[in-house]
Image (cartoon, grey):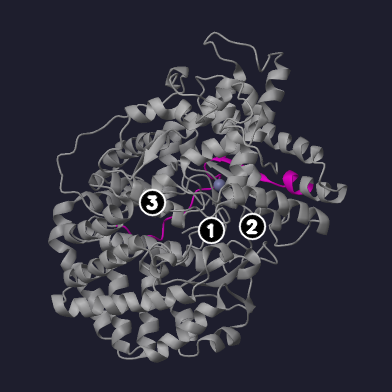
Amino acid sequence: MRAYWLACLIFAASLSAAQGASQDSSEAKPSPQLEHFSVANADASANACQDFFKYADGKWVAAHPIPDDMNTWGVARILQLWNETQLRDTLEKVSSNDSARTPDEQKAGDFYYSCSDEKTLNANAAAWLKPELSRIASIKTKSGIVSEVAHLHQTVDGAYAPADNQTTAAVLGFSGQPGYDDASHYVAVFDQGGMGLPARSFYLDQDDKSKEIRAKYLQHVQKMLVLGGEKTEAAKTDAAVVLEMETEMARAAMDPIARRDPKNLNNKMTLEQVKALAPSFDWDLYLKLVQAPATQQYIVTTPAFFKNLEVMLREHPVEHWKTYLRWQMLHGNANALSDAFSEENFDFFGRTLQGTPNQLPRWRRCVQSVDGSLGEALGKVYVARAFSPESKQRVLQMVNDIEAALGRDIDAQDWMSPETKAQAKQKLAAVMNKIGYPDHWRDYSSVKIGRTSYLENQQNAVHFEFERWVAKIGNPVDRSEWGMTPPTVDAYENPQDNTINFPAGILHAPYFDPSQDDAVNYGAIGAVIGHETIHGFDDQGRKFDLHGNLRDWWTANDGKEYEARGKCISDEYTQEVPEAGPGVKQDGRMTQGEDTADNGGLHLAFMALQADLARQGKDMDAKEADGLTPRQRFFLAYGFAWAGLARQESIRTQVLTNPHSYRRYRVNNVVSNMPEFWAAFSCKKGSPMVRQNACRIW
Ligand SMILES: [Zn+2]
């Protein structure tokens, strides 16, 4: 479950990682080494002013081909593997049936055991599935449809994931979320949902590649229904029904660019108004089944989607809905069932959409599954093993220095009025900095985890998390709560509680590296800290005030000036992405927030390094022992943090669905906007890394 509006750093989770099962039970135990920055990684045969990504990363990339079980590979993925190896050691110790285990160890250990026990999974999955299938088969009325939707929301992950382009849960999404007008309390939110493909454009685009993917999706749905017990011919007809229904939902769904503007989503309604949108859906029954607290106000993110739901409930017979719900149930539970299910699931979502040849070994999928389901139970141990109080202190100091740099940057803007500057600085001063892990760990005592049924364990964990969010409705927001688990290699900003969050998982080499000097650390983790700090002031974040309320605190003229600078960025990033295949173009309006954070973030990190070196009496441009200046090492370390590559299919899916630009552009577009970079490598006007129309907001 994700909190709303999390603006994170990477977000391109390796889909192949979350899906499927491995045939290989004799797995070698890797012990990966962390990657460290070195000037030797630079490619001397490349020209830093022509293609800085190639210069900083070309050599590393050539030496590190993508493993067969990954859609993308790079220094971040190596750190992720290192983290998972730490978790695996712990989980193997606590997965034996030992009465001396603590309650958290019992839950994490037995969850891992039930996931790892392939034999039991394959032998029993059909029996576990039976009650799910018979419940759907017995549906006779529209109320039955509603009951099943509630059940799927309680047992399949993702009933509320609006930080994604769409909610993938059956039919619609529901959860508690901080209110737009008053972010101090949670309100109830209904969101669009219901689609199995990664974005609405996957249903609607008419180019050849999109048609090819839809044809494969149709086959995939058919095969899943056959695995669920249908005859081949019936499953073919039913798969067409699923695609038809999901396409109708996609047509009515709001597009991801419009969804980036929170004003478009802040549609406040009473329950009577919600009911009027789709009278055929028994809202009272749904709310009762998911145990939602009574409340005065609901936010309906996309009213048009719910009006269309009414049309669909009237026009499609109950049999169609049963087919759709059966597919959603099989799809949502695929990775907790037999190898046949997870292999078929991987074949479409891993191979077709990401281009990944093989699934991850089972141990990695199981570690990720425990992290996803009981993340704070497991995270506690990870922090004790792998994150020192010294690291926490040093990172906190860097965060303070980078926030101070933003204060100076706000002061220096010649296009902002004193009134807006004062508001911006109030917001900055109110940011809560969270480093490493939560101060209070989540209490999992009510989650029942056993050693036998992986499916049941997963469903129990989802139920706990879904109800935990629903129960928040009407209650105060707790800013100290985390939206990512401690071992995660990522970071995020949440404008609705005005926090920036850096899980312990990313606070290792090559991002935060105690063995390196300040220039390297500011270029790597400093840029990450700057990125999250800027999110509160990107084109979305700036719409929220210091309390996290959606409120326009800009003078009209300053707002206009901001938008002109934002358009420079979105125009710059509206570009062909040849790595994604012919004709694939990035829409800079979708990535504008992330691109703004990348550009402003590196600038803030640079300012903080300047101040840091000045304090130490060091010169930014004096050559040091390795033959480079601190300025050069700063930019090389930034480049190295993005070292890596991805498969073409995966890049295509990313460009079409993800708010982050592809890594080469996260390096080259950013540095080519920065005179501070041009000076580092003496780049001349006219070279590709010296942009004529350089953009800068922060
Ligand atoms: Zn971000």
Provide residue 169's location: percent of width, then percent of height.
40, 69
Q: The magenta stretch spans which residues? A: 426-449
Q: Amino acid at mark 1?
A: Ala
Q: Amino acid at mark 2?
A: Gln
Q: Callout 2: helix, strand or loop?
A: loop
Q: Callout 3: helix, strand or loop?
A: loop
Q: Residue at x 49, y 43 (%)?
A: 490
Q: Residue at x 16, y 67 (%)?
A: 126
Quick one: 668 or 530, which is closer to the camera?
668
Q: What residue is disc 1 on? A: 3
Residue 666 numbered tag: none
Q: What residue is disc 2 on? A: 496
Quick one: 373 or 19, which is closer to the camera?
19
| CA distance for labels 2 and 1 | 9 Å
Query: Does residue 53 appear in this view?
Result: yes
Q: Residue at x 68, y 19 (%)?
A: 613
